[in-house]
Image (spheres, helix red, strand yellow):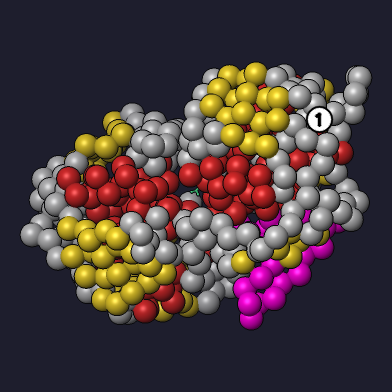
């Protein structure tokens, strides 16, 4: 398995460009199953999770052509030959479950492996299934698979008013996609409001869907007979989690870096927290550029993760790495996932002083981080370890970085352009 060798403490300088959002790309790619015409994208992120989804779409019968020179990807899902997403793929990436809504809406049937838990939690899908059942789907759980059919009556899902017990991102996305081809209108209440939901709504409307309010707590979808993509290649929004990670890299090393293709409007909670801690940022909303400037030291913070627009759970680990070197203590509480503190033991091995009590982490601050061999456990925990290695004295080894490659495009190359002494050492995968 590959590892990264990072020499610290690093002083970053130069410019970096944020890639398109992983968590917007994945649902939008599953939504191509709704289109009766091929869909073309420009500048999709080159990530392991995107490749996994390409594999899943191909397994269903889709064809995918890439024009690397012009960064174009064309997906044609009209030759679909299977309605089954198998365990071997779904187990590697939960987002595979997002094919359920589109397949059911377009073909009246879908068989998708239960995603199973992952390192950070049980990752249930009860909210997805309850919602689809309210639209007329017959759900059968058997042998680790979810089989959804439209046995009785019309071969179409029925629009309905559906209140989500929790603003689940995935459930909102599955439901939106299913509703675009349903008979009648669907109203989703207590919908997730993440920017990735708004981008999915934008993409669905590019295919002729009638989606209103995507990105707000109430989404209204007027079902259509069919959808077809046309016009210029679709460009997915910038990745706000990658953006937050590079912002924290600049602040944590007290460096001046320039970050391009960053949508600061998607980062209110992160920017407010960093500024509260003493970070100095220069933000150009129109040009989508943020510069990190030199600061006079950082003080601790109290943060609790929450659904958007609250502080994102996907930035919790990276923020924790930053708080270890703040001059005063911090408290970080995780409300979204039940097991998202696996970066804590590894950060403590690098000299941090973090104590866990239930779903809160108490971080002492004032740590002088020391290099160490550390192990990645999940995507965002891995990013936290890279950040700590940038600030630590000495040469750190960050192992099992396949976790990182799931959600950070060319992270070693991007950090090298920021003057970081970082090497990727290929291992036996
Ligand atoms: C999306 O996951 C993101 N993934 C996650 O990012 C992100 O952490 C999460 O939203 C929260 O913002 C993608 O977009 C591909 P949820 P998702 O459904 O859709 C519980 C990353 O690092 N829940 O909002 O799975 C669930 O167990 C990844 O990029 C149910 O109980 O998130 C979890 O505790 C990690 N029943 C919480 O809700 C359900 O039916 C949030 O889940 C659905 C969810």
Q: Nearer the viewer, residue 148 or 7?
A: 148
Q: Residue at x 27, y 58 (%)?
A: 283
Percent across and percent down for residue 195 are: 48, 44
Task: Decide if residue 342 is on the left or right side of residue 101.
Answer: left
Task: Indicate the quadrant containing the C terminus: top left, top right, bottom left or bottom right.
Answer: bottom right
Count every numbered label the image shows and give the total: 1
- Magenta-colored stretch includes residue 255: no
Q: Residue at x 27, y 70 (%)?
A: 257
Percent across and percent down for residue 331 are: 23, 37
Q: Nearer the viewer, residue 309 or 202?
A: 202
Residue 119 in view of the camera: no
Q: Residue at x 24, y 53 (%)?
A: 322
Most distant residue in the left direction: 296
Quarter occupied by residue 40: bottom right
Task: Decide if residue 149 is on the left or right side of residue 299.
Answer: right
Q: Nearer the viewer, residue 95 or 243?
A: 243
Residue 291 in view of the camera: yes
Task: Decide if residue 73 is on the left or right side of residue 218.
Answer: right
| Residue 65, placed above or below residue 186 | below
Q: Which residues are magenta?
A: 47-73
Q: Residue at x 35, y 45 (%)?
A: 316
- Magenta-colored stretch includes residue 56: yes
Task: Indicate the quadrant containing the N terminus: top left, top right, bottom left or bottom right.
Answer: bottom right
Percent across and percent down for residue 398 are: 40, 66
Tell whether circle 1 marks a residue whose Cβ is less than 8 angstroms from ligand 1.
no
Q: Disc 1 marks which residue?
A: 148
Task: Decide if residue 289 is on the left or right side of residue 298.
Answer: right
Which element is circle 1 on? Answer: strand
């Amino acid at each position: 398995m590959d590892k990264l060798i990072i020499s610290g403490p690093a002083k970053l300088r130069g410019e970096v460009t944020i890639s398109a959002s992983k968590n917007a790309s994945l649902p939008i790619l599953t939504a191509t199953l709704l289109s009766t015409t091929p869909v073309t994208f420009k500048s999709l992120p080159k990530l392991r999770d995107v490749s996994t989804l390409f594999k899943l779409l191909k397994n269903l019968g889709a064809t995918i052509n890439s024009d690397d020179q012009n960064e174009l990807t064309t997906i044609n899902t009209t030759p679909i030959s299977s309605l089954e997403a198998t365990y071997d793929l779904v187990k590697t990436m939960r987002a595979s479950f997002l094919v359920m809504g589109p397949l059911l809406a377009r073909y009246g049937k879908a068989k998708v492996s239960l995603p199973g838990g992952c390192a950070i939690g049980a990752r249930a899908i009860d909210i997805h299934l309850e919602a689809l059942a309210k639209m007329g789907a017959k759900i059968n759980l058997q042998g680790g698979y979810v089989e959804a059919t439209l046995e009785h009556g019309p071969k179409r899902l029925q629009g309905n008013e559906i209140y989500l017990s929790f603003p689940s991102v995935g459930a909102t996305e599955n439901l939106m996609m299913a509703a675009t081809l349903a008979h009648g209108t669907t109203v989703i209440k207590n919908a997730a409001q993440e920017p990735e939901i708004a981008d999915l709504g934008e993409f669905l409307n590019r295919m002729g869907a009638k989606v209103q309010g995507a990105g707000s707590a109430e989404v209204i979808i007027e079902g259509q007979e069919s959808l077809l993509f046309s016009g210029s290649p679709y460009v997915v929004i910038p990745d706000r989690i990658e953006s937050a990670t590079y912002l924290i890299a600049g602040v944590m090393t007290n460096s001046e870096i320039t970050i391009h293709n960053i949508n600061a409007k998607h980062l209110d909670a992160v920017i407010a927290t960093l500024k509260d801690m003493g970070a100095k940022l220069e933000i150009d909303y129109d040009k989508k550029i943020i510069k990190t400037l030199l600061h006079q030291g950082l003080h601790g913070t109290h943060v609790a993760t929450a659904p958007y627009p609250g502080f994102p759970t996907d930035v919790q680990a990276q923020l924790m790495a930053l708080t270890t070197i703040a001059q005063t203590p911090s408290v970080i509480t995780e409300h979204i996932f039940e097991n998202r503190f696996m970066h804590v033991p590894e950060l403590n091995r690098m000299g941090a002083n973090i104590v866990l009590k239930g779903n809160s982490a108490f971080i002492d601050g004032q740590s002088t981080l020391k290099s160490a061999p550390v192990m990645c456990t999940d995507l965002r925990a891995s990013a936290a370890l890279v950040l700590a290695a940038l600030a630590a004295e000495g040469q750190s080894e960050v192992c099992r970085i396949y976790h990182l490659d799931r959600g950070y495009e060319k992270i070693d190359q991007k950090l090298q352009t920021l003057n970081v002494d970082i090497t990727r050492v290929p291992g036996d995968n």
